[in-house]
Image (spheres, rainbow, N blue to C red):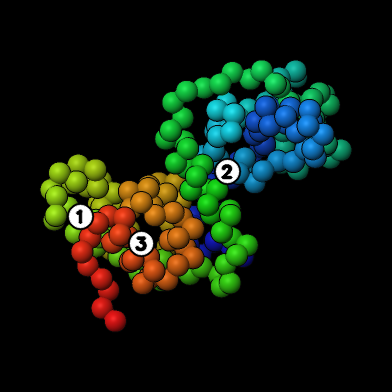
């Protein structure tokens, strides 16, 4: 399953690894296998939502970056000095709400991929984005104060629909913010048909409108 047709790939993945030292440490202490969640490979994921700590990308002992593919590497250990990369006392950080929106969106994308029967396609996604833009317009017409919240994302959607409808879309700058404002998950946007998406939108945004049969 590929997202290449609908999501811009450039700059979406890290060149080097990043990891949560507390996740590594917890798995080792519990006797569970060490693994690296796919979520950590996304450039815009900078925090661990489980431990509220920043992901790190350098060995704390030798300062080396960890290549995505390295000879003789072992999960959880530095590929250069072989030091353990886990840490049970990494400082917790507050104020990661904005990053959590990206983490939730990317996590939803990862989770929905194995269950999709057909590859996603751009024309179908554009129809759903048109529906979202229409829904935002209805919300603003019902309450002009909502333009403060929706105005910027509506303009981004309008430009995309008018000028970039045949090009893959930016996951972080467009799709995730659109879903956040529309109160719909990435999984719902990509897996449901237009009618189902309309039902979700009009219910969540309290719009008294339905797509005609």
Q: Local crowd at mark 3 within 10 Å, few (<14), some, or many (≥20)?
A: some
Q: Nearer the viewer, mark 1 or mark 3?
A: 3
Q: Nearer the viewer, mark 2 or mark 1?
A: 1
The residue under the point 45% across, 60% down is 188
3D distance between C-alphas at marks 2 and 1: 33 Å
- Number of disc labels: 3
Farthest-out residue, right = 72
Q: Which residue is mark 2?
A: 42
In this rendering, does residue 63 appear at all?
Answer: no
Q: Quadrant of residue 71?
A: top right
Q: Local crowd at mark 2 within 10 Å, few (<14), some, or many (≥20)?
A: some
- Mark 2, secondary structure of its residue: loop
Left-right relation of 84 to 92: right
- Mark 3, secondary structure of its residue: helix
Of label 3 and label 2, which has the lower sequence position? 2
Left-right relation of 33 to 113: right
Q: Which residue is mark 1?
A: 139
Farthest-out residue, bottom = 213
3D distance between C-alphas at marks 3 and 2: 28 Å
Q: In this rendering, is residue 166 above or below 155?
A: below
- Nearer to us in this view, 177 or 89: 89
- Nearer to us in this view, 23 or 177: 23
Mark 2–mark 1 CB contact (< 8 Å): no
Q: Which mark is residue 200?
A: 3
- Mark 1, secondary structure of its residue: helix
Q: Position of residue 112 (x, y in %)?
A: 56, 59
Q: Nearer the viewer, mark 3 or mark 2?
A: 3
The residue under the point 55% across, 34% down is 49
Q: Quadrant of residue 161?
A: bottom left
Q: Position of residue 178 (x, y in %)?
A: 35, 51
């Amino acid at each position: 399953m590929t997202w290449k047709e609908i999501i811009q790939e450039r700059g979406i993945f890290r060149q080097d690894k990043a990891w949560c030292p507390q996740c590594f440490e917890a798995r080792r202490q519990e006797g569970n296998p060490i693994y690296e969640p796919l979520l950590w490979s996304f450039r815009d994921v900078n925090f661990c939502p489980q431990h509220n700590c920043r992901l790190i990308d350098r060995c704390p002992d030798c300062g080396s970056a960890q290549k995505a593919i390295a000879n003789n590497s072992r999960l959880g250990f530095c590929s250069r000095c072989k030091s353990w990369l886990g840490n049970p006392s990494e400082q917790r950080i507050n104020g990661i709400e904005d990053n959590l929106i990206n983490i939730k969106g990317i996590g939803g994308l990862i989770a929905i991929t194995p269950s999709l029967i057909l590859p996603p396609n751009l024309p179908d996604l554009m129809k759903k984005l048109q529906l979202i833009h229409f829904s935002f317009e209805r919300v603003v017409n019902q309450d002009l104060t909502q333009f403060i919240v929706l105005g910027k994302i509506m303009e981004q959607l309008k430009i995309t629909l008018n000028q970039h409808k045949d090009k893959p879309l930016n996951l972080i700058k467009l799709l995730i913010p659109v879903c956040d404002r529309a109160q719909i998950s990435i999984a719902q946007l990509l897996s449901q048909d237009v009618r189902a998406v309309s039902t979700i939108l009009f219910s969540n945004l309290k719009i008294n409108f339905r797509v005609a049969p």
